[in-house]
Amino acid sequence: MFLPFIQALCCILAQATPSRSGTIPVLPTLETGYHQMYDLQFYQAHQTFHEWERLHPQDPLAPSADAAAYLFTEFDRLGILQSELFVDDEKFKKSASLTPDPVAKRQFENALALSDRLADAVLARSPKDSNALFAKTMNLGLRSDYVGLIEKRYFTSLSYMKSAGILSDKLLAVDPTRYDAYLATGVENYMLGLNAAPVRWLLRIYGAQADKEQGIARLKLTAEKGHFLMPFARLLLAVAALRDKDKNRARQLLAGLAREFPNNGLYARELSLLQ
């Protein structure tokens, strides 16, 4: 599925030499960094992503992943990923304004800018490069999350969300097995599909996709077959289950996340509320 990463990793492992203890040193991977990020080990995640970037300076997914870690750091600091904010729309709309960390915001934007430059350079040579297309899709999704959930600029967030959906469709036409990309249109369809029918009609005129059931189906693809974004897709499905009053399904999803990421108190906390 992620052939460039596998090939690169195999090349490095082939050249690795055992240490004095006879074991091969552990090498950084983006997978490791994402796991650390979801487990709220942000410092370690940044270290892992930076080391991958040093080893693969042309890979746009390295700075994109680094940007994701800055975003999730802010989510954790500001308490954004608490499911009741998503379950109770009015509570979310009326919640107090948030104050972004200016340093984290600058680092977030710098990482995205670097990723976009690297991806654009690859796409200039190879317009259908799935790795670069995925990085660009990720970056748009990260920007949508930042301006929507932290800065609460919802129309700007919608614009980024729509662009991410268009690009993800282009990516999936090239590589339908890039299951992480289904998250972009999954979120767009589900979140916008929650609006009343007249609003959905207006959103479709605007060009947004607003089909709740299709959104759930796409989120499930990422949750079941995805890679970097699989845990996030599972969290979103847990939130969707809570909205639909399906506590058993939400409990199942949150229990799995709590086992996999024991340092992340969000999952255990939300799970305890369902007991």
Image (tube, grey):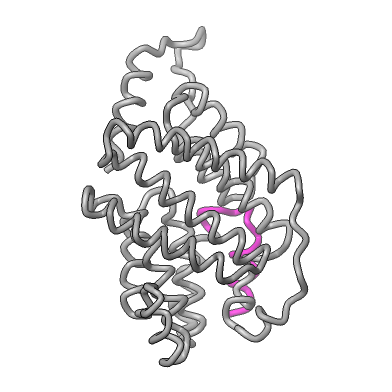
For image coordinates 58% across by 76% down, the residue present is 86
Q: How many numbered callouts?
A: 0
Find residue 78 and report its image quarter. Answer: bottom right
Please state, as top left, top right, bottom left or bottom right, where the N terminus lies in the image: top left
For image coordinates 57% across by 81% down, the residue present is 87
Front position in the image: 258 or 198: 198
Relative side of 205 to 51, left or right:
left
Residue 220 shown in magenta: no
Find residue 187 and report its image quarter. Answer: bottom left
Front position in the image: 111 or 239: 111
Find residue 133 and report its image quarter. Answer: top left
Q: Is residue 127 above or below residue 183?
A: above
Please state, as top left, top right, bottom left or bottom right, where the C terminus lies in the image: bottom right
Farthest residue, direction top: 20
- On the image, the x and y values in percent for residue 181 come to 35, 55
Front position in the image: 219 or 251: 219
- On the image, the x and y values in percent for residue 171 come to 29, 51
Q: Which residues are magenta?
A: 259-275
Q: Is residue 40 above or below residue 56?
A: below
Residue 272 shown in magenta: yes
For image coordinates 44% across by 54% down, the residue present is 229
For image coordinates 35% across by 79% down, the residue present is 211
- On the image, the x and y values in percent for residue 223 come to 38, 61
- On the image, the x and y values in percent for residue 3 come to 27, 35
